[in-house]
Image: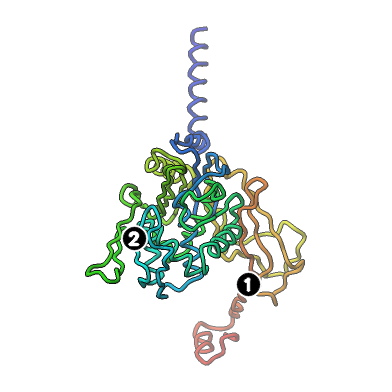
């Protein structure tokens, strides 16, 4: 009996070890819990895909202080000319709060004003830009709200270009501001400006230039940090939009009313990089079989035009499914190189992307040489131009 018990115990241990070895580590390991934050509202977004990876009070309408200037900057970049000479209007001089000390009638380029806006959070630069682009502050805020609607910022309203607490009607949400950061970071001019640590711009009438030091300490504190904007008012409290790029992958965070904003942003991005790796779901040139009734002529294939990656937790991969949508019910060799449909990708019921499908036709192969032809006969046939008779 003792021997039987001993052997049974050994068998149980053996089976347990085998199960542990055969079980994939990725399945056993659960994703780490999101970090605790001081922020009242926060959001984390993957810039390339636009996927919101984390949200705390993500749709709550809140004051956003100078994070407003992200919208001011992107509207100006898209609608203005960077080398345009801009004259400072009288209403921009002496605006309360952060300033780059503009003088009435002073001339700067729009690009210089954008650096003053984003590095030093100049409220006078914001009013100058708004007047130049929109004709007036109200005219410019109309453009800001139009752009917000286009981006999909459904719970946002702007009443000024700088973010000062002029009314309760100037607000946004963590998720809306994350969408704005991701949208703006796709613009190379915006990316260059917000990642700059020090910039000298002209100072008309003075013997020296203005030296602008970026207020965003994340550029010095966090590995890979490359944006975006700080903000503070007495009512909004500390607000921060941050971004960082590691191994070619960029994340952005928003924290609103956060007493420990620098650490909040760092913890959120660390968590995002660790728990939402990019998963390659489609390869470039990958052959796809239609899952709908489609007739493919012999020798024709459907292939993807590009690869597709998406940030996913390991446990989410099983929830990915694909669907082929075709524009034609019959694919022929005459359609070689033409767009024939799309490979759509879904995470559960949400479509996360699609990849175009092109028609590819097999390349004809050379006819096999006849056994009666010697190697030299084939060689001279090719040299003399008789490739198909060789």
Whether residue 82 sits left or right of residue 151 in the image: it is: left
> Counting residues from the N terminus, which is met first, the one under dot 2 or under dot 1?
2
Instruction: Find numbered disc 1 in the image and state the secondary structure of the residue it sits on.
Output: loop
Q: Is residue 109 above or below residue 197?
A: below
Place of residue 47 in the rendered image (x, y in percent of width and height, measured from the top left): 49, 54
Instruction: Answer yes or no: is residue 192 visible.
Output: no
CA–CA distance between discs 2 and 1?
A: 64 Å
Instruction: Find numbered disc 2 in the image and state the secondary structure of the residue it sits on.
Output: loop
Instruction: Answer yes or no: is residue 235 visible.
Output: yes
Q: Is residue 12 above or below residue 212?
A: above
Report the residue at 40% width, 72% height from top. 87
Residue lying farthest to the bottom in this orientation: 384
As rendered, which of 363 and 112 lies closer to the eye?
112
Report the residue at 40% width, 61% height from top. 124
As rendered, which of 127 and 112 lies closer to the eye?
127
Place of residue 228 in the rendered image (x, y in percent of width and height, measured from the top left): 41, 54
- Locate the C terminus and report the quarter of the image it occupies: bottom right
- Residue 142's label in the rendered image is none
Place of residue 366 in the rendered image (x, y in percent of width and height, measured from the top left): 59, 78
Q: Is residue 26 above or below residue 359?
A: above
As rendered, which of 66 and 74 lies closer to the eye?
66
Q: What residue did someone put label 1 on?
A: 362
- Residue 100's label in the rendered image is 2
The quarter of the picture where residue 109 lies is bottom left
- Number of other residues with Cα within 10 Å of mark 1, as a class: few under 14, some 14 to 19, many 20 or more: few
Closer to the camera: disc 2 or disc 1? 2
Contact (CB < 8 A) between labels 2 and 1?
no
Q: Is residue 224 above or below residue 275?
A: below
């Amino acid at each position: 009996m003792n021997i039987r018990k001993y052997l049974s115990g050994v068998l149980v241990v053996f089976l347990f070890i085998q199960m542990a070895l055969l079980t994939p580590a990725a399945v056993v390991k659960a994703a780490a819990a999101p970090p605790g934050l001081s922020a009242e509202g926060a959001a984390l977004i993957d810039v390339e895909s636009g996927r919101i990876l984390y949200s705390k009070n993500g749709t709550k309408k809140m004051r956003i202080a100078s994070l407003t200037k992200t919208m001011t900057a992107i509207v100006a970049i898209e609608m203005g000319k960077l080398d345009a000479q801009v004259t400072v209007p009288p209403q921009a001089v002496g605006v309360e709060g952060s300033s780059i000390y503009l003088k009435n009638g002073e001339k700067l380029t729009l690009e210089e004003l954008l650096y003053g806006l984003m590095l030093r959070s100049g409220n006078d630069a914001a009013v100058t830009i708004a007047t130049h682009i929109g004709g007036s502050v109200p005219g410019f805020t109309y453009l800001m709200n139009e752009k917000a609607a286009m981006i999909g910022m459904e719970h946002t309203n702007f009443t000024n270009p700088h973010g000062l607490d002029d009314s309760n009607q100037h607000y946004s949400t963590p998720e809306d501001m994350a969408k704005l950061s991701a949208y703006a970071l796709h613009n190379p001019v915006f990316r260059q400006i917000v990642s700059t640590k020090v910039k000298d711009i002209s100072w008309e009438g003075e013997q020296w230039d203005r030296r602008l030091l970026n207020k965003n300490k994340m550029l010095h504190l966090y590995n890979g940090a490359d944006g975006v904007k700080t903000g503070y008012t007495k009512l909004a409290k500390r607000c921060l939009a941050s971004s960082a790029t590691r191994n070619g992958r960029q994340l952005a965070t928003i924290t609103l009313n956060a007493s420990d904003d620098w650490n909040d942003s760092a913890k959120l991005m660390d968590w995002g990089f660790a728990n939402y790796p990019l998963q390659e779901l489609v390869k470039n040139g990958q052959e796809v079989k239609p899952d709908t009734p489609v007739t493919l002529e012999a020798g024709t294939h459907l292939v993807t035009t590009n690869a597709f990656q998406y940030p996913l937790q390991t446990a989410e991969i099983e929830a990915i499914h694909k669907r082929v949508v075709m524009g034609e019910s019959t694919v022929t060799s005459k359609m070689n190189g033409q767009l024939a449909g799309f490979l759509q990708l879904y995470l559960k019921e949400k479509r996360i992307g699609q990849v175009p499908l092109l028609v590819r036709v097999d390349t004809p192969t050379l006819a096999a040489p006849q056994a009666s032809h010697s190697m030299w006969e084939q060689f001279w046939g090719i040299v003399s131009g008789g490739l198909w008779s060789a």
